[in-house]
Amino acid sequence: MGGPAVQDPGTRETTRPGRAALVRLVIVVAVLGVAGAGAWLIARAGTPEASPTTTDIPALQVEPADVEPGSVIPAADTIAGAETGAGQVRPRPQAGADPLREWAERTSAAVGVPARALRAYGNAELAMRAHQPDCRISWATLAGIGRIESDHGQYRDAVLGDDGRPSTPIIGVPLNGSPGVRAIPDTDGGALDGDPVHDRAVGPMQFIPSTWERWASDGDGDGLADPQQIDDAALTAARYLCAGGRDMASAEGWWAGIMSYNNSVEYAQKVFGLADTYARQAQTAQG
């Protein structure tokens, strides 16, 4: 798969002022466990590494967008009512309130992405909006990467469970220097990828073990960072893309971020086309 040596904005609603205020309150606390509970694991500082380019990706049929690298960014879409400042802690919503789940289910029908995966991408966008607002990363960009890397956690007929884990662990090809593949000797003793000889990219967002170790994040608030768990993987990918103060809503920042994930123009053009389509479909569905 083509993930990093590591690997979209939501729908707008038109509501009455009182309901809009309530939505703003509950959606933030529902998805920003990282703000109230210190949920992501602060990883070692470092510069992201370029991705290995592999030959086995589940989106070979995806056409690259006809855009010049660095010239434009994908269409933008924003998850309604979820703006907040970094580090704010809000009361938890009442039992049963899950605005992110509701947004994901509505958006899933429009964009053809599993709702469980959208929850992870949306959660990562909102977490970064709170903790690193100048990055301005979108759920649509994360969804574009997730589509290419693992078909949103469904690679090779895996089923993405409600716990955010694929029914079969997603593990890429050995990075053994074969044609089109970088040679990366084992860095984790096979702990994450089961291979004690060569590293392999792991999980829905396809991180290699050494990059996961550096950027590992806990997106679901369970106190663990698991590359196979899509909330953790999506938040880790968002942090990786936002490294170094990068602005993912600028043309320069967006292209630099995607190519730090996988140093391939064609890969970046594919992510662009997917992210742009997801955002526009979500906008159209919301009228």
Image (tube, rainbow, N blue to C red):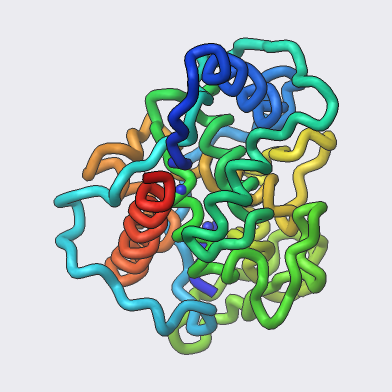
* Apparent side of residue 107 relative to residue 242 in the rendered image (left or right): right
Question: Hey, which quadrant is residue 218 in on the image?
Answer: top right
Drawn side of residue 286 relative to residue 100, left or right:
left
Residue nearest the observer in this picture, 103 or 133: 103
Q: Position of residue 268 (x, y in %)?
A: 33, 62
- In this view, the residue in front, 7 or 94, is 94
Percent position of residue 41, x then y: 71, 33
Identify which residue is drawn at 28% across, 66% down. 265
Q: Is residue 26 left or right of residue 277?
A: right
Residue 150's place in the image compared with 252, above or below, is below
The residue located at (54%, 68%) in the rendering is 149
Q: Give the position of the C terminus as an image quadrant.
A: top left
Q: Is residue 275 above or below residue 12?
A: below
Relative depth, front residue between 235 and 140: 140
Across and down, in percent, residue 68 comes to 15, 61
Q: Can the viewer see residue 125?
A: yes
**Residue 4 visible from this viewpoint:** no
Position in image of residue 262 (x %, y %):
42, 62
What residue is rendered at 63% in x and 80% in y? 173
Residue appearing at x 74%, y 58% in the figure = 228
Report whether 226 appears left or right of 22.
Answer: right
